[in-house]
Amino acid sequence: MRIYCEKDYNAMSRRAAAVIAAQVVSKPECVLGLATGSTPIGAYQQLVEWYKQGDLSFAGVRSVNLDEYVGLAPTHDQSYRWFMQHNLFDHVDIKPENTNVPSGLAADAAAECARYEDVVKALGYADLQLLGLGRNGHIGFNEPCDNFPVATHLVDLTQSTIEANARFFASADDVPKQALTMGIGTIMHARSILVVASGADKADAVRKTVQGPVTPDVPASILQLHPNVTIIGDEAALSGLR
Ligand code: F6R
């Protein structure tokens, strides 16, 4: 694992954007695995800026997102499809048909999971997978449990994740209770992985990810077994590391 400590959120975002941009420049038709949540927003803003300056093109990029809430339409402003359109896709030259997010409205969730896993597999998995980190060590919506889920699957969100995400909804009752997420296996197929973490409330999760035992109780701890992981955090997020 390579770990970069940046002084604050903006510096973290800029370095994360540089890693993503380097991937796009070195392989313009690459497959980017993308994440939502608060942490990557600054990196996406920086990528949009470099695109607008003419320094970066996403014309050949294919993207696969980690996850989507069950029951939210792509037009719902808390859906992860909407998030991606709003924070990145609508502002760069990525082709809409080259962007993939699981469908939260599929009548048959199991069939949608199988379809999505096939899409990611057919693309050859991600060249670079961007990940945020849940406070409980989740990646995608792979919550702490007693095994590492292999493929894209339906999950029941934990109370801690529902509460953490309630800030984006009118109340915790409005947060969807289920999501579709890439599995740990899907994520581990990526050829390189970039984890971004910001703030003191992530310090414990970062410490367990990097220095704790590899256990499905801390899903991100499996990244210790991946040969090409970069973690970029701000000082607060990395403050728990020895
Ligand atoms: C988002 C995702 C989640 C988030 C995680 C951290 O697509 O899969 O695992 O990355 O919940 O979220 P933030 O960045 O909001 O703290």
Image: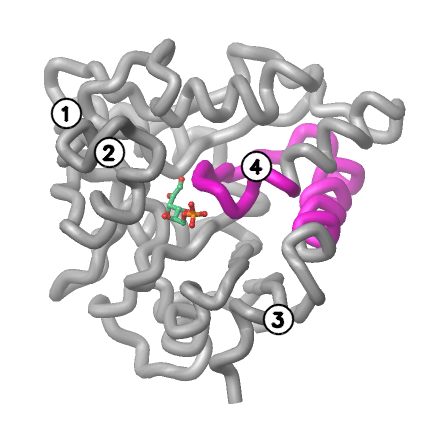
Q: Is residue 128 left or right of residue 214?
A: right
Give the magenta range: 13-42
Label 2's element? strand
**Mark 1 and mark 2: Cα distance apart in space:** 8 Å
Q: Mark 4 vs mark 1: which is more N-terminal?
A: 4
Task: Please indicate, yes or no, whether residue 103 appears anywhere in the rendered image.
Answer: yes
Please state which amino acid type lies under the numbered disc 1.
Answer: Ala
Percent position (x, y) of residue 25? 79, 37
Percent position (x, y) of residue 83? 46, 25
Q: Residue furthest front?
A: 170
Marks 1 & 2, CB-CB < 8 Å contact: yes
Q: Residue furthest bottom?
A: 242
Please state which amino acid type lies under the numbered disc 2.
Answer: Leu
**Mark 3 and mark 4: Cα distance apart in space:** 26 Å
Instruction: Give the label, 4 or 2, closer to the camera.
Output: 2
Marks 3 & 4, CB-CB < 8 Å contact: no
**Mark linked to residue 180:** 2
Using the image, determine if residue 233 lies above or below residue 55.
Answer: below
Residue 14 sits inside the magenta stretch? yes
* Residue on which disc 4 sits: 32
Label 3's element? loop
Residue 211 sits inside the magenta stretch? no
Please state which amino acid type lies under the numbered disc 4.
Answer: Leu
Q: Mark 2 vs mark 3: which is more N-terminal?
A: 2
- Along the line of sight, the residue nearer the viewer: 50 or 164: 164
**Mark 4 and mark 2: Cα distance apart in space:** 18 Å
Residue for point 37% across, 76% down: 208
Percent position (x, y) of residue 205? 38, 69
**Mark linked to residue 109:** 1
Marks 4 & 1, CB-CB < 8 Å contact: no
